[in-house]
């Protein structure tokens, strides 16, 4: 009886082995091979089940059958491991093939930004003045009435306040209408014993202007100020011509026109010939043939006095130019509002990339 059991177990083991090897051979993927392993060698697997039957064997037979079972288990384990390795290698090869990178393909272009055209114009002006030893000064956009008007010779109720329609925040606080308050702030703190004051101040300004082709309610200005002994109107004229020639080129026509600002005396305005009509008159220049780009003049003695500077010793010139108008003229943009629409197609035209 016991010999029969031994015979059956050995046969059964042999049968499991053959069937197992067959299944291993046919396995197509890692998951199948893992199922085969569990079915053969797992806790509830067929080999384990057979080994449980060894209880009924004689003490003499048990080690022999046990050793035979172990050999079969080792063989199957090894066959599974080998197949598993092959399938993993195959899987990797397939993945590598599907994920192959062609490094010779042209790369997709990366969209990079470029400084806004108004920033470019302001940078160009800054560079020009830094080269002449000017300092670049910043000032607050929310400004006190005191600096925006009073320190510039515009006391409350002065009629010239109407020249710049103002966004007031409180009675004393406003959105600055011009960069000129930075003049007053800088003059107040400058130590003239250390040398002349030469500054520019670029920034945003705000006015309750009705938007049209050449006016925006928010625009930019670059203020300029030089205070020293013996500064003349000739120095102002030379500086203005230098700015115009640098930004617009040698051939653009400019004209100086007498004007009025409460903080300069005498005062001038500078016009550049219209880029659109070349001077014959059109809708952009409102039929005049010229576009006004800046105001300037010799600093009024009252302004010097209020900032604590002695007008008997010192004097100088100031100007306030409009980079928005400069950019229009330089690039032939016929509507100032284009600068504020943030249309990438428009802005890309001024890309600085080669
Ligand atoms: C002033 O603002 C004076 N502070 C300029 C100045 C400074 C004169 C120092 C004397 C001494 P005005 O309001 O003209 O001046 O403006 C100066 C420039 O800003 C104009 O020539 C124009 O180029 C620009 N500008 C004025 N209003 C607008 C607007 N609504 N939109 C776009 N640009 C404007």
Image: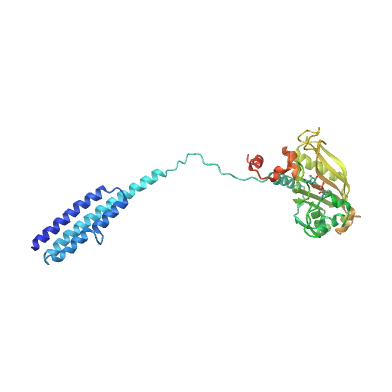
Colour logic: rainbow
Q: Position of residue 255 (x, y in %)?
A: 84, 38
The front one of 211 and 19 is 211
Q: Position of residue 329 (x, y in %)?
A: 75, 39
Up/down of 314 relative to 55, above or below: above
Work out whether residue 116 can be spotted: yes
Q: Position of residue 68 (x, y in %)?
A: 16, 59
Determine the residue positioned at 16% across, 54% down. Answer: 14
Determine the residue positioned at 27% across, 57% down. Answer: 38
The front one of 31 and 297 is 31
The quadrant holding residue 332 is top right
For the C terminus, the image quarter is: top right
The quadrant holding residue 138 is bottom right
Up/down of 293 relative to 43, above or below: above
Q: Position of residue 41 (x, y in %)?
A: 24, 58
Work out whether residue 202 can be spotted: no
**Residue furthest front as drawn:** 210
């Amino acid at each position: 009886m016991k010999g029969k059991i031994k015979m059956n177990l050995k046969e059964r083991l042999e049968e499991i082995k053959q069937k197992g090897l067959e299944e291993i051979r046919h396995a197509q993927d890692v998951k199948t091979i893992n199922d085969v392993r569990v079915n053969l060698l797992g806790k509830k697997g067929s080999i384990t089940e057979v080994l449980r039957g060894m209880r009924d064997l004689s003490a003499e037979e048990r080690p022999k059958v046990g050793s035979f079972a172990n050999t079969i288990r080792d063989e199957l384990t090894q066959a599974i491991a080998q197949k598993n390795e092959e399938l993993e290698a195959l899987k990797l090869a397939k993945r590598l093939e599907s994920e192959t990178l062609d490094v010779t393909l042209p790369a997709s272009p990366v969209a990079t930004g470029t400084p806004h055209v108004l920033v470019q114009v302001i940078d160009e002006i800054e560079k020009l003045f830094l080269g002449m030893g000017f300092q670049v000064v910043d000032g607050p956009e929310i400004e006190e009435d005191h600096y925006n008007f009073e320190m510039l010779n515009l006391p409350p109720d002065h009629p010239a306040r109407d020249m710049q329609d103002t966004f007031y925040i409180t009675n004393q606080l406003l959105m600055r209408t011009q960069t000129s308050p930075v003049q007053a702030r800088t003059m107040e703190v400058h130590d003239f014993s250390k040398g002349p004051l030469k500054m520019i101040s670029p920034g945003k300004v705000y006015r309750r202007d009705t938007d049209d082709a050449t006016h925006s309610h928010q625009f930019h200005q670059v203020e300029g100020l030089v205070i020293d002994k013996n500064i003349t109107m000739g120095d102002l004229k030379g500086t203005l011509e230098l700015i115009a020639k640098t930004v617009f080129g040698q051939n653009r026509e400019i004209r100086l026109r007498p004007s009025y600002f409460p903080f300069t005396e005498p005062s001038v305005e500078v016009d550049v010939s219209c880029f659109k009509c070349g001077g014959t008159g059109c809708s952009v220049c409102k039929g005049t043939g010229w576009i006004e780009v800046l105001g300037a003049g010799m600093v009024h003695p009252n302004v010097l006095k209020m900032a604590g500077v002695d007008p008997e010793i010192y004097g100088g010139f100031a100007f306030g130019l409009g980079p928005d108008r400069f950019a229009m003229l330089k690039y032939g943009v016929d509507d100032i509002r284009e600068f504020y629409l943030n249309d990438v197609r428009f802005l890309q035209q001024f890309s600085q990339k080669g």
